[in-house]
């Protein structure tokens, strides 16, 4: 166990927001190590600092104090170009509201990150088709987002997140806008990808369904990590978790 | 400095942090074109203000060319007709310029047009906050976003200003023909007219780009977190 590769390391991170004259401390010292290839759920009520922590891990926001390492690189040290590269190559984002680019077809949405990464157009198209097949949309390449259902849009988003073979997939409430069964399909898809492609999936969620597939559940409350449940403990105490949220 | 480029795990697919993110020009052109096509009606309205302002500019400019063409013939009857039509021509003048009042009206109309473009483009940026944020999350640099907006404005500018300049020139020629008869068009220097049209179109393109610059910079500088936080 000595050589566990930590893809994300969060060390003594605090984050203070200035809302007018009021200072709000969203994170009050968070330490977290995430092992590569795991499926992590970050749980917590709204306002707990969950999204803030999430944005830090995604390199979208910088901590007030403390350090965030992604693949042993301190993100506070990176300039705009390196951050863009990191977002493009290392991290795949999945959003609650899907956030597909409305004017582009499903295929173009998936190929966009590959174009950014400098891949040739034909190679990108070919890989895009392969990824869309992987998420089960083989007959919907040329549909625009508004011609797709919520679940299908989220599948396109999953394919897009995988475009540059990222090390991490960040999913912010990926099932928040989906109905129960579609949500379960997306969760199953993410779990499958995490297992088969060895991608680290980190998802922020309220969704109890996501707990069953998680390797680790991080509970956040009031800007602190309340506790971290491992998979084994979870399966024993699932009933209790159901009660507490 | 170098150690942060090194990886803890050398077996990973990509090594270290690099800085190479690209968006080929052809692809930017394609995206901008799609943006215009999808919002065709709105783009049309934005372009329309440019068409009107530029056609006014072109109309005034070509009218002056027509008058100069008629004066160049040296025919006293034509000179009389021009004075009768309201042009202030000195007894020994061989050409006329635009009057200060006319210049002011043109400048005002162009200013109004720029304000309209800024307004429309600011709205376009606000509308696309989320999309810009998404693109940035996918690795887009500030200048990709800037380039997309500038290209879009350039395309609108070229179409709008081009159409406006031609429309203005045509109307000016028709107008002159109705007032003075075919002699007006017969004596005009076509090189001058072409120059007027090109200059008007060029001015229109510049205005379109000037109008989009601030909104585009605003869009490009936006942090992805802020963009994502906005509810739609």
Image: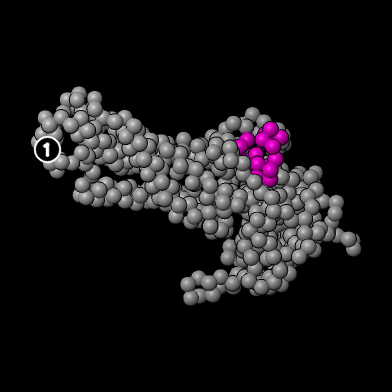
Q: How dense is the environment of label 1, judged by Cα within 10 Å: few (below 14), some, or many (20 and up)?
A: few
Query: Between residues A9 and B231, which one lies in front from this camera angle?
Result: A9
On-image quarter of the C terminus of chain A: bottom right
Q: Is residue A151 visible?
A: no
| The quadrant where residue A133 appears | top right
Give the residue at mark 1. B83
- Residue depicted at 19% across the width and 34% down the height: B71
- Residue depicted at 79% across the width and 52% down the height: B15
Residue B45 x/y as whole percent:
35, 40
| The quadrant where residue B205 appears | top left
- Residue depicted at 40% across the width and 50% down the height: B211
Badge 1 marks a residue whose secondary structure is: helix
Residue A191 x/y as whole percent:
74, 47
Q: Chain of mark 1?
A: B
Is residue A112 magenta-colored?
A: yes
Classify residue B132 as left or right of residue A233: left
On-image quarter of the N terminus of chain A: bottom right
Residue A230 x/y as whole percent:
79, 60
Classify residue B96 as left or right of residue B209: left
- The magenta stretch spans which residues? A107-125
């Amino acid at each position: 166990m000595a050589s566990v590769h930590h893809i994300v390391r969060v060390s003594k991170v605090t984050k203070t927001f200035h809302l007018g004259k009021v200072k709000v401390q969203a994170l009050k010292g968070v330490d977290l190590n995430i092992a590569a290839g795991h499926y992590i759920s970050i749980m917590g009520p709204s306002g707990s600092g969950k999204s803030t922590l999430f944005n830090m891990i995604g390199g979208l926001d910088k901590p007030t104090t403390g350090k965030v390492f992604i693949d042993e690189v301190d993100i506070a040290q990176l300039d705009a170009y390196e951050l863009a590269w990191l977002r493009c190559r290392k991290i795949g984002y999945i959003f609650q509201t899907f956030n597909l680019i409305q004017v582009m077809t499903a295929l173009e949405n998936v190929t966009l990150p590959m174009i950014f990464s400098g891949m040739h157009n034909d190679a990108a198209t070919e890989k895009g088709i392969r990824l869309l097949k992987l998420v089960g949309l083989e007959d919907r390449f040329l549909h625009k987002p508004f011609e797709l259902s919520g679940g299908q849009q989220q599948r396109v988003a999953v394919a897009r997140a995988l475009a540059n073979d990222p090390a991490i997939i960040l999913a912010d409430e990926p099932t928040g806008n989906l109905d129960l069964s579609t949500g379960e399909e997306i969760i199953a898809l993410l779990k499958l990808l995490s297992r088969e492609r060895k991608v680290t999936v980190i998802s922020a969620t309220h969704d109890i369904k996501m707990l069953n597939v998680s390797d680790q559940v991080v509970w956040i409350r009031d800007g602190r990590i309340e506790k971290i449940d491992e998979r084994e403990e979870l399966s024993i105490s699932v009933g209790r978790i159901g009660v507490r949220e | 400095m170098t150690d942060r480029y090194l990886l803890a795990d050398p077996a990973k697919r990509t090594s270290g942090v690099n800085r190479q993110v690209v968006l080929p020009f052809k692809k930017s052109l394609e995206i901008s074109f799609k943006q215009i096509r999808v919002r065709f009606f709105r783009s049309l309205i934005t372009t329309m203000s440019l068409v009107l302002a530029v056609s006014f500019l072109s109309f005034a400019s070509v009218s002056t060319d027509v008058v100069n063409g008629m004066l160049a013939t040296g025919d006293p009857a034509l000179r009389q007709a021009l004075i009768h039509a309201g042009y202030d021509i000195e007894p020994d003048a061989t050409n006329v310029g635009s009057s200060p009042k006319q210049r002011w009206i043109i400048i005002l109309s162009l200013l109004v047009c720029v304000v309209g473009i800024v307004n429309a483009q600011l709205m376009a940026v606000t509308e696309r906050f989320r999309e810009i944020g998404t693109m940035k999350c996918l690795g887009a640099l500030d200048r990709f976003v800037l380039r997309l907006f500038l290209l879009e404005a350039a395309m609108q500018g070229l179409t709008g200003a081009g159409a406006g300049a031609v429309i203005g020139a045509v109307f000016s020629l028709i107008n002159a023909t109705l007032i003075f008869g075919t002699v007006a068009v017969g004596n005009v220097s076509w090189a001058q007219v072409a120059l007027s049209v090109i200059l008007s179109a060029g001015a229109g393109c510049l205005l379109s780009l000037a109008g989009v610059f601030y909104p585009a910079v605003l869009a490009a500088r936006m942090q992805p977190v802020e963009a994502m936080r906005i509810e739609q």
